[in-house]
Image (cartoon, grey):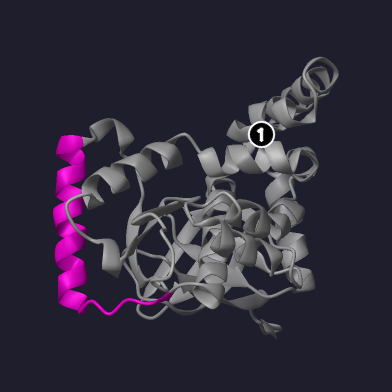
Amino acid sequence: MDTTPDNDRKATLKADLFGSSMWPAQIVELELAGERLLVRGQAFCQQIPLHQIGWARTGEGGIHLLELPDGALLHCSPDPLLEQWRTATRSGRSPLGRRVQQAGMALAATLLVWAGLPVAAESLLPQVPPQIDRHIGQRLLDRLDTLWLQPSELPAKEQQNWRQRLTDAVSQVCPDARLQVWSLQFRRGPGDDGSAGAIGLPGGTVVLLDEQLGRGTLNAVCRELGQLQQRQGMRTLARQQPVSLLMGVAFDDFSSTVAVAAPVLAQHLPFSAPSANRLARR
């Protein structure tokens, strides 16, 4: 990402915008203006209050992910200016926000004494920003695409038909399992094991396998959405890797949580034992 020094204007940064429901994926320009972040893209410019932006940092090269209020993500490469903006965002938190975090830390200490690390970590999940779930889910999907899944062979129109039918059906058949934001992705499995027809990933992504689309698909989607609504994947991570999650809440840096998530959660996805072991080892 390039920093653009200019005597006539504030420093700007480049970032990749993706996941927006209004704008296509593209390179955008970022600029900090007081308590707002300006996002300039192709034929649009947004001004977003800093306190409405979710900020996460991954474990690979210090990559930053900024989540915008509409759910879109900004993928930013490391830059000293980003740290300044991150500090400005933290310093702009309200006293109430700081008290909430301090209360969370006190709760964590109490639970460490009375219930142990896993229970303490799981109890602090409400303090883990939703964008962390989405980032972990994307990392896990990338891992699956690399080691196990293959591109769907369904035509784009047929995929869209399935999306529409299932989205409409979910609201009627399993309204209690609905999420505010969720999406369907289509892939093809290797066909050599008995994997489930739907795979729910943290953050609201449900992967459907071409070869198992059929009568049971709706029930499978409802089941996965119900588990995602309860953040079962993140609960599993809290039980398996409590220290990384506790440290993330304490220091507002979930890079270690993201780093360990994919291999841990791969062991608990609905695969046959050989496939799960293969994904967990790599």
Q: Position of residue 89 (x, y in %)?
A: 68, 50
Q: Is residue 143 left or right of residue 224?
A: right
Instruction: State the residue at coordinates (22%, 49%).
Output: 216
The answer to whether residue 38 shows anywhere in this view is: no
Q: Is residue 96 left or right of residue 28?
A: right
For residue 269, above or below residue 13: above
The residue stretch that appears in magenta: 150-173
| Viewer-closest of 154 and 161 | 154
Q: Which residue is denoted by mark 1 in the rendering? A: 94
The answer to whether residue 7 shows anywhere in this view is: yes
| Viewer-closest of 7 and 20 | 20
| The quadrant where residue 142 appears | bottom right
Q: Residue at the top extreme? A: 114
Instruction: State the residue at coordinates (41%, 54%).
Output: 199
Disc 1: CA contacts within 10 A as few (<14), some (14-19) or many (>=20): few
| Viewer-closest of 185 and 279 | 279
Q: Is residue 151 magenta?
A: yes
Instruction: State the residue at coordinates (66%, 54%).
Output: 261
Q: Position of residue 130 (x, y in %)?
A: 53, 45
